Image (cartoon, coloured by chain):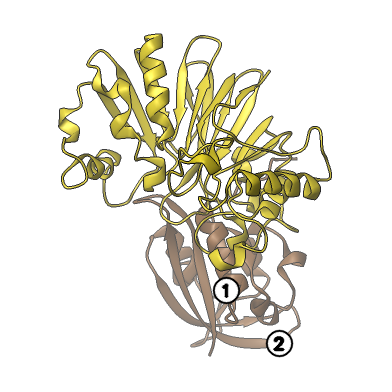
Amino acid sequence: MRLKIWGCRGSLPTPGIETVRYGGNTSCVEVAFDDGGVLVLDAGTGIRELGAELVRRGVRRLNLLLTHLHLDHLEGLRFFGPLWDEGVSVDIWGPPSPVSSLRDRISRAFSPPLFPLDLRDVPAGVTFHDVPRTPWELGDATVSASLVVHPGSTVGYRIETSGASLAYLPDHEPALVGGVAGKTLDWISGGAIAEGVDLLLHDSQYFEDEYPQYVGWGHSSVADAVAYADAVGARRLVLFHHEPLHDDDSLDRLEARARELAGRNGDGPTLAREGMVLELP
Amino acid sequence: MAAVRPKHLVLILAREFAENLATPTLITDERGVLVFYNEAADEIFGRSFAEAGETPLEDWATQYSPRSVEDDQALPLDRRPTGIALRERQPAHERFRITGLDGVVREVEVTAFPLFAHQDELVGSVTIFWRA
């Protein structure tokens, strides 16, 4: 399994000279498998460039897993090149809603006044799926989804092959339900999907002293992210969903703080960066 | 030893809610297994949840001898609010008598309601005890 980060900024695209090292595009991660299959996590603005790359590679079939439909995880979809090719098939998976289908919810972003074209105008073969309640197979991978603490209906994903496992929880505020201290894994939000993974991509939007201003907004402090990774037994932690107000120098400090909290340096937590490639065995 | 079942997010949220309530509150999963009650409920039941642990609700409830206030006979299952909430997927309310593990007889009013995550996905129930 090979991952590439195409966007790891939270909340709002943040281009500019102060964010060139970590990047300003919002959430999008490519997961490539040994059999050539491609799975895309979220459709933030990072998906535009990924789409151009997939078109160049001639990928004709792919799966897109959406954690939720907040704009920073969806706004790139309209500019995702493969959608505009009638020879491409895209399966889009996302959290269920008690009131409307995934297609209907996404179609709001593909309609005036937000966008000039309608979802009906998309030439690719697009199929929408609510995530199943039990694990399902996508090519060589087994995927599991679980609702996690974040405003609105939001899921985290676990992706597992015979040799590697990944958990993706880009927007997650476990502290809102009492954190992880003293809790068994079954009572930890997302615990079942993050348990013992080789790699955990987890929300770490704030420094500890910033978090109190944003309680309930759905995101974690760096301390909560490190504690969460420890509680679920993740082997490696990559911090994700960077606060738009944090420039590169701030994010360097956030990474140093994460390593200090984890008590490790060389193999300690790292911050996601646009263009980062992560190989899992 | 059987693996512990992960709790649905709705149960995790319900537990956090209950932990911050001064009203005695009990939570079950969709199978009717008691998965949590709060400190306020300790006084009614005579011991803490940490001591009680997860257990099927009907087994657990037997210890408290729920009885009708009208004739002091055992309260039939079809009048027990939590069971109704889970079986019939609707809220229920009843007044009855229990004997705590401390030997004290108490009259309680109990309201139970089912928890649905998405559409028909029943994930558990919440039961609230009001001092009668």
Place of residue B55 in the rendered image (x, y in percent of width and height, measured from the top left): 66, 58
| Image side of residue B51 versus residue A251, left or right | right
Q: CA distance from mark 1 to mark 2?
A: 19 Å
Q: Residue furthest front?
A: A17
The colour with which the image depicts chain A is yellow
* B64 and A107: which is toward the camera: A107
Q: Quadrant of residue A122?
A: top left
Quarter of the image with the N terminus of chain B in it: top right
Instruction: Find disc 1 in the rendering and name its residue.
Output: B25
Q: How many marks?
A: 2
Place of residue A26 in the rendered image (x, y in percent of width and height, measured from the top left): 45, 40
Q: What is the chain letter for disc 1?
A: B
Q: Give the class, few, some or many, for how many residues have Cα within 10 Å of label 2's Cα (few <14, many ≥20).
A: few
Label 2: element kind: loop
Place of residue A42 in the rendered image (x, y in percent of width and height, measured from the top left): 43, 35
Looking at the picture, does residue B106 appear above or below residue A229? below
| Image side of residue A88 versus residue A112, left or right | right
* A259 and B34: which is toward the camera: A259
Numbered badge on residue B104: 2
Q: Quadrant of residue A151?
A: bottom left
Q: Residue furthest bottom?
A: B132
**Same-chain status of marks 1 and 2:** yes
Q: Which amino acid type is shown beneath numbered disc 2? A: Val
* A131 and A220: which is toward the camera: A220
Q: What is the chain letter for disc 2?
A: B
Q: Which amino acid type is shown beneath numbered disc 1? A: Thr
Residue drawn where x is 39% and y is 69% of the image: B91
Which lettered chain is shown in brown?
A: B
Place of residue A13 in the rendered image (x, y in percent of width and height, measured from the top left): 43, 43
Q: Nearer the viewer, mark 1 or mark 2?
A: 1
Residue drawn where x is 78% and y is 50% of the image: A261
Looking at the picture, does residue B7 appear above or below residue A49? below
